[in-house]
Each structure stands twice: as C-alpha cells, then as structure tokens.
Amino acid sequence: MSTELIPILALAVMFVAATLLPVNMGALGFVAAFFVGTLAVGMSSDDIIGGFPAELFLTLVGITYLFAIAQNNGTVDLLVRGAVRLVGGRVALIPWVMFGITGVLTAIGALGPAAVAIIAPIALGFAARYKINALLMGMMVIHGAQAGGFSPISIYGVTVNNIASKAGLVSSPLALFLGSLFFNAAIGVLLFVFLGGRDLLGRSVHDEHHHDDGTVGGASVAPTRLRGHGATTTTAPTQTVTAENSPPLATAVRAITFDQILTLIGLGALALFALVLDLDVGFISMTVAVVLALASPKAQKGAIAQISWSTVLLIGGVLTFVGVLQEAGTVEYVGDAVASLGLPLLVALLLCYIGAIVSAFASSTAILGATIPLAVPFLLSGNIGAVGVIVALSVSSTIVDVSPFSTNGALVLANAQDVDRDRFYKQILKYSALVTLVGPLVAWGIFVLPGWL
C-alpha cells in the first residue's frame, strides 16, 4: 500500500472505532498520528507534535471555562428568563426565543453541545408545561445552536476559517456565518409550520394558568405580592407563593448579583475585543474567566472540571493526525484523484453527503477538521468556488447534529418530558434521516450550484 493511502485507511478505522465504541476519537487520533507518522511517513515525534493545534486548544479551554463560570453563577439562566419575559408570554414565540438564545450563546463562543445542554432542559420543560410539540422545541434548540455556530469567534467558525486560511483558500467568515444562520433559520420556519407552531398562535402563558372564571386549576385566587420583590402574582390563598410554584412569567424578577453583572460585562468585553479589535479569542476568554474567578472564587468552584476536556482531546487528536496526513502527501493524492473525475459539481455534492453521513454518527468538529483539508487541492484548482463549497460542507456536516446518536440529539432525547421516550426517539431518528438525505442536496444547490460564492 502506498504511503498516501495509509493515513486514509487509518482515518477510516478511527471513524468506525469512534462510532461503534465509546472511545474518544481524539485519543485515537494521537495514537494514529504517532504510529502512522513514525512508521509510515518517517516523521519524528517533534514533527508530529508540531501539528498540535495550540491556538484552538487555548480557544476551547478559555471559552468552555468562561461559560462554565457563567452557568454556575446563574448568568445564563438570567439571560434565558429575561428573553422569555420579552415576548410578553406569547407561547408561539417561546420556540423562537430558545432558538435565538442558543444561537447567541454559540455565536459568542459557547460550544454547540454546551449551549444545547444548558438550554434544552429549560426549553423542553416549557414544551411540557405549555403543550408545545417536544420535537419542535428540541430541534429548534439544536438548529439555533447551529445557526450561531459559525460566527467568527465560535468554535466551528474559528476551526473552519483557520483551516481555510492556512491552506491559502479564499474564504469569507461572514458568508460562512450568514450561510449557516439563514439555512438553519429556514429549517426553523419549516419546523414551526409542520410541527404544530401555527396552533400556538394566539395562545399566551397567562391563558395556560388562568381560567375565565378567575381560578387556577379550579381554585379561587387572589393577588399576592411576593415579599421583597415588589411583583404581583396570582395563586390560591392557601398556597405559599414561591418562585417554583408560581407561573413562570409572573414570577418576580430575582435580584441580579454582582457576579452576574461582572459576567455580563465580561461577555460583552469578549465580543468587543474579539470582533472589533480582532484580538485572540482564546486569550481574551481566558482573561475574562480568570478575572471572574479572582473576583468571586466561590462562584467559579468546579468550573475547571466543567471545561469540555473531551472536546479539547477530540480536536487536538484529530487535527494532529491531519498534520501527519498532510505530511504524507495524502491531501495532494486525494486532490489529484478528485480533479481527475472532471466533474467539480458532483465532487462537491459527494463531499457534502460524506460530511453529513459521517457527522450524523461522529463529531461534527472532527469531520470539519478532517474533510475540509482533504478538499483543499480540489478547491485550489479554481474550477469551483471555494467559499461556496466550504459553506455547503460546513452546513451539511452540522445540520445533522439532530441525530439521536450525536451529542445534541441525545441531550434533547434525554431531557424530553411527558413523552413516550421510545416514540420520541423514533421521531428524532426519522427527522435526522430526512435532514441527512435532503440537507446536503439543498445546501449544495444553494451555495455551490449557482456559483455565486
């Protein structure tokens, strides 16, 4: 077997092993990089380690550390409660609020699974309470995460843009971000239309708790003021009013703590310095996290353990292996093979489907880190727009995160309330199969076929 093919075989074995076994693909990547690099390619250990993505490592650790602190001190919950109150209790807007909040979290740097893990339990709790289709709510959360997932300071965005930049490809961070944003928003509209969203129009949170005869669940009610909060709610006179048993949007606004104020300032500073001043996201997020930790040591307790170490290992291992793959000449080999087909549009479509199918069972981040470098020579040929292919491949590889075998899909399945879990699992599975079948074709048709990117 030629040297160029050995890394491809190793990559295939990694994907299969990581899919069938509970083994982190990043760990497999480090092992494969060592054995393939030293035995097949003739690289030294220093050369192999040189391919480790140090910049991405810092970004991942800094961002997940910061959001762990924000979650622990209640800042994320504060943002969610505030956003829901802004819609004035209109039930039909709640799925879109969850879509928007998750999108904002990933857009400013949160990992997609982390954002879904934070928002999905809240969103599915709303779905159960207000009789919103659980599949609608869960998928809106996931697609919201993907909508913001390719901003210039997000994990996906940084990964793809760095790969494209280092490869010398013409790239457009704005096109990548907006492409994913509008594609997932369009899916959200379809979900809303076909999964019962229209039935929610005209309903309000107030209507769910209060009957026309002035009762709650058949009991007479009277206005009651929550002591120390200055907000009025309605409950049965014999019932003690608490933040837990009062209507969610009628519950008094809790006082904002100093930690939360400082965290909000820190998140604003992160967006300002990273987007406007173009400073390194990893260093800025780590700086903000450390400032918060020093200001309130108790509030950040346990945050280090909440860093997404499995994702850090995943990306570090896969991209280190990609460095070996490039050194072996596999990239050029595959590029030449693809170019020989003479059908650039067909090749681009096949790449989108490969990314989607594999990503439905494996990590989207790993797929992006492996498939885009393989497409580099093909894109450098100039026979097809690089920006369009990158956007289509990125969208195709991430919209399938609705699969119940992916982290996001599993989180939604695990947090669903008041549903038949087996039936709900089959619903998610059917939806993810539909997305995997149709999504890449639509993405290819929008971003690649017209040739406008």
Image (cartoon, helix red, strand yellow):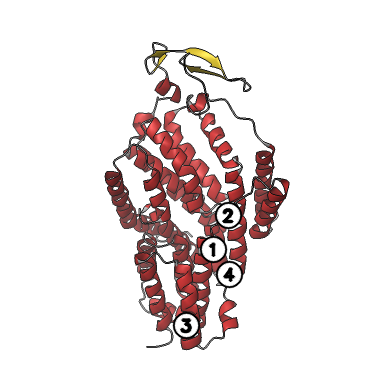
Q: Which residue in the protein does label 4 denote?
A: 53
Give the SS element for disc 2: helix
Which amino acid type is marked by label 3? Phe
Q: Which mark is residue 64?
A: 2
Q: Earlier in the sequence, mark 4 or mark 3?
A: 3
- Asked whether disc 2 touches disc 4, contact meaning CB atoms under 8 Å apart, the reply is no
Which amino acid type is marked by label 2? Thr
Q: Earlier in the sequence, mark 1 or mark 2?
A: 2
- Compute the Cα span from label 2 to label 4: 17 Å
**Residue 265 spot, x, y in % from top left:** 69, 43
Q: Nearer the viewer, residue 419 or 358?
A: 419
**Residue 86 spot, x, y in % from top left:** 54, 30
Q: Nearer the viewer, residue 257 or 182?
A: 257
Please say if 323 is above or below 452.
Answer: below
Q: Residue at x 46, y 87 (%)?
A: 40
Give the SS element for disc 1: helix
Q: Which numbered mark, 4 or 3, is in the foreground of this view?
A: 3
Q: Which mark is residue 35?
A: 3
